[in-house]
Image (cartoon, rainbow, N blue to C red):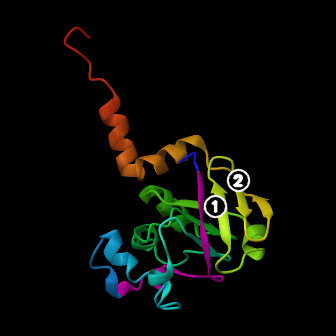
Amino acid sequence: MDKVLRGKAHKFGDDINTDVIIPARYLVTTDPQELAQHCMEAIDPDFPKRARPGDFLVAGYNFGCGSSREHAPLSIKGLGIPCVIAKSFSRIFYRNCFNIGLAALECPELVDATSDGDELEVDIATGTITNVTKGKTFQSSPVPEFMREILEAGGLIPYIRKRLFSQTAPGPSQ
């Protein structure tokens, strides 16, 4: 995931927990497209209809707090959102994002300077985020190369499979 991503910001506040991201009644499936239909519906029922592939979810402090379910980042990824940008993340949610192939960047300054609907450009490799609408550029920590490889593979399990199957098995003479 070394390319520059571009899309609109969909902005949410602080302390958005996993039950708000995807209500528990929908946890009967792990299908990202099905989960996506209900993403954030508790606070914005029209969000799944407005969000377009390539857009960004932008949030305040402590995004993804609550339970450790992977359904929450799966519902966001199911909408085609490649990256969540927040002031801060719950640790488990942050790790779950990468586990399922969804980038997560912390950048409080960008969140404060971004309005709903602003056009953003995000470079995961360098951590550079530009609010194109407002003409301002911000810096988050870049995603390390091995974590970008996990994102590129589509998550931790596909990354591990790829690494395991790309290794050559020892032959009879070894």
Q: Position of residue 45 (x, y in %)?
A: 47, 91
- Residue in the image at 37% along x and 36% along y: 163
Asked if labels 2 and 1 touch by Cβ distance under 8 angstroms, the answer is yes
How crowded pointer 2 is (Cα within 10 Å; few <14, some 14-19, many 20+) is rated as few
Residue drawn where x is 47% and y is 62% of the image: 96
Q: For marks 1 and 2, give the CA distance.
A: 7 Å
User: Position of 111 compared to 72: left or right?
Assistant: right
Direction left: furthest residue: 172
Pointer 1 local density, CA inside 10 Å: few below 14, some 14–19, many at least 20: many
Q: Amino acid at mark 2?
A: Ser
| Left or right placement of residue 154 versus residue 31 in this view | right
Given the image, on which type of amino acid does mark 1 rest? Answer: Leu
Which mark is on residue 105?
1
4 versus 56 height, above or below: above
Secondary structure under badge 2?
Answer: loop
Q: Which residue is mark 2?
A: 141
Is residue 90 rendered magenta in the image? Answer: no
Q: Give the magenta-colored segment's residue range.
A: 4-24
Q: Is residue 106 left or right of residue 166?
A: right
